[in-house]
Image (cartoon, rainbow, N blue to C red):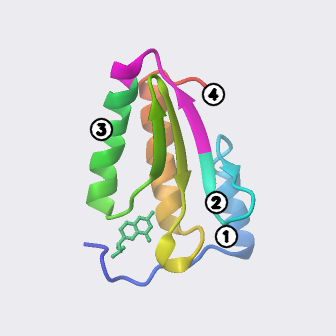
């Protein structure tokens, strides 16, 4: 669906506005990417969250870099084909935030 479409790297004012719309995300040092750590009640809830995000990622053809131990999920978002942040990262981050909220994430 989005495969093959040229992805524009976010720069300047558009990048600043995107980061302002995602206050729970941090810029990764040393690369143009954003990250967020989430904690859930237990592994079951964390994995339910990951399943929702995985299905969204598959629909978008846009995949998180993530790490899970028990109830914790560390997520990094970047767009490899543009070597930085794109609107795809912003869309996936907003989806992650909405689902984290529904599933009672902390941090
Ligand atoms: N996921 N985060 C991320 N960044 C990409 O550039 C990316 C992806 N998933 C699939 C994908 N690119 C494909 O479009 C290409 O690797 C073919």
Task: Answer with mark 1 or mark 4, whichever residue precedes in sequence.
Answer: 1
Q: Which residues are magenta?
A: 36-45
Proximity of marks 1 and 4: CB atoms separated by less than 8 Å? no
Q: What residue is rendered at 45% in x and 35% in y?
A: 68
The local secondary structure at tag 1 comes to helix
Residue 24, horizontal then vertical, whole percent: 65, 40
State the separation of the CA atoms marked 3 and 2: 25 Å
Instruction: Tell whether 6 sits left or right of 26.
Output: left
Q: Which residue is mark 1?
A: 14
Which one is in front, 14 or 79? 79
State the separation of the CA atoms marked 2 and 1: 6 Å
Q: Judge whether 55 appears above or below 87 on screen.
A: above
Q: Judge whether 56 appears above or below 79 on screen.
A: above
State the separation of the CA atoms marked 1 and 4: 26 Å
Q: Which residue is mark 2?
A: 18
The local secondary structure at tag 3 comes to helix
Q: Which residue is mark 4?
A: 107
Task: Answer with mark 2 or mark 4, whichever residue precedes in sequence.
Answer: 2
Proximity of marks 2 and 1: CB atoms separated by less than 8 Å? yes
Q: Residues within 10 Å of mark 2 (few under 14, many from 20)?
A: some
Q: What residue is rendered at 62% in x and 73% in y?
A: 10
Which one is in front, 20 or 49? 49
Q: Residues within 10 Å of mark 1 (few under 14, many from 20)?
A: few
State the separation of the CA atoms marked 2 and 4: 20 Å
In the rendered image, which quarter contains the N terminus? Answer: bottom left
Which label sits in the foreground, 3 or 2? 3
Residue lying furthest front in this view?
69
The local secondary structure at tag 4 comes to loop
Q: Which residue is mark 3?
A: 51
Does the magenta segment cover residue 81? no
Which label sits in the foreground, 1 or 4? 4
Does the magenta segment cover residue 42? yes
């Amino acid at each position: 669906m989005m495969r093959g479409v040229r992805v524009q790297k976010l720069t300047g004012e558009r990048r600043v506005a995107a980061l302002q719309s995602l206050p729970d995300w941090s810029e990764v040092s040393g690369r143009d990417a954003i990250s967020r750590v989430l904690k859930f009640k237990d592994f079951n809830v964390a994995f339910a969250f990951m399943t929702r995000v995985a299905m969204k990622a598959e629909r978008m053809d846009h995949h998180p870099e993530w790490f899970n131990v028990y109830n914790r999920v560390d997520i990094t978002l970047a767009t490899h084909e543009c070597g930085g942040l794109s609107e795809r990262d912003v869309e996936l981050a907003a989806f992650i935030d909405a689902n984290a909220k529904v599933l009672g994430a902390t941090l």
